[in-house]
Image (cartoon, rainbow, N blue to C red):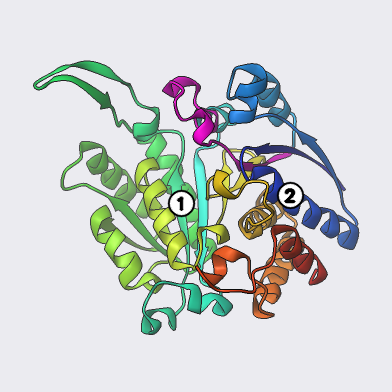
Amino acid sequence: MKYNIALLKGDGIGPEIVDGAVAVLEKIGEKFGHSFDFNSYLIGGCAIDKTGLPLPKETVDGCLESDSVLLGAVGGIKWDSLPGDIRPEKALLGIRSALGLYTNLRPAKLYPALKDASPLRSDIVQKGFDLLIVRELTGGIYFGERGYREGKFGREAFDTEAYSTIEIERIGRAAFNAAMKRNKVLTSIDKANVLETSRLWRSVMHSLSDEFPQVKYSDMLVDNAAMQLVRNPSQFDVVVTSNMFGDILSDEASQITGSIGMLASASLGDGKRGMYEPIHGSAPDIAGQNKANPIATILSAAMMLDYSFDLHDESECIENAVRKALENGFRTADLLGVGRDGAISCSDMTKKIIEFI
């Protein structure tokens, strides 16, 4: 079987981590008899430098013609002074919207080999955790009306959060379906004691829960959720929340796994095509130095095989290879901590994972 994959390498460490994932996919193709056709397109700062736009039409068209999309990272200090509407990060919102990707899946799993890398207390770490954050991706404050106006204290900026019943229903249903495939436990995160959008969110989620009586459903306020993630992460299985809350909580979840360099993500819509990316940024301070951790991008490629191509055995093969590399003591610098020796390069970590496939 042949699969057409659009590569959006982007900025900073994006090219090197995407190259690592491509090498792993090519090994999977060789092992399982698949063929992957990779086509690269510009996005983010590098697209601005060459075209003046963070998301050229050619990139959007290429992604729409692909079976799925693998993204590295965008942004960097070089473009920080640009207006908001042409910053590299604007491309992420644009490509998600163009592809109709409203569901973001962010697994956060503590590998036993990385227990010492987690900042949590040993008694918490010993329990382990394996949770899935389901984040609404194309609504909320990131896509609301914004601007400047004269306010009570003079000139002020504003950003508007809005959610419709339909938007909440579709992300809620995706979360309930995800829970059905796991341990049938779902926690919905909101701020219903303050925000009107959260009160609608909670009302819609309660109605949906009647359709899934097998799922143990509960609500939690976002400030409590932030605390509970570090106090007792093992209590969570599937978590569903809004765009902004999901953005924040998933980054928090990444840190308790040992490194943000470990967390993959999948962005999905109504069809099989998705966009897969690590949740970390472009890390311009180490770009081009072969120091980046490629594991989050490699695990994102594994999610692509699973969710978009229904290649479950192939996806599991990658996950097992990552686990074995870690169990054998191989670490990039972010997994070792400051001042500790023994780190291997981005390309060497990729090679080790390939050896275990």
Q: Which label number is shown at residue 134?
A: 1
Q: Secondary structure at mark 1?
A: strand
Task: Check residue 14 for magenta coloring.
Answer: no
The residue at the point 31 percent across, 43 percent down is 204
Q: Tell me: 9 left or right of 132.
A: right
Q: Secondary structure at mark 2?
A: loop
- Other residues around mark 2 within 10 Å, as few (<14) / some (14–19) / many (≥20): some
The residue at the point 45 percent across, 55 percent down is 133
Magenta region: which residues? 67-92
Q: Is residue 122 above or below residue 200?
A: below
Q: Earlier in the sequence, mark 1 or mark 2?
A: 1
The residue under label 2 is 309
Q: Quadrant of the C terminus?
A: bottom right
Q: Is residue 208 visible?
A: yes
The residue at the point 70 percent across, 66 percent down is 316
Which residue type does callout 1 highlight?
Answer: Val
The percent position of residue 55, horizontal first and vertical second, equals: 60, 24
Which residue type does callout 2 highlight?
Answer: Phe
Q: Quadrant of residue 58?
A: top right
List the single residue furthest toward the top.
150
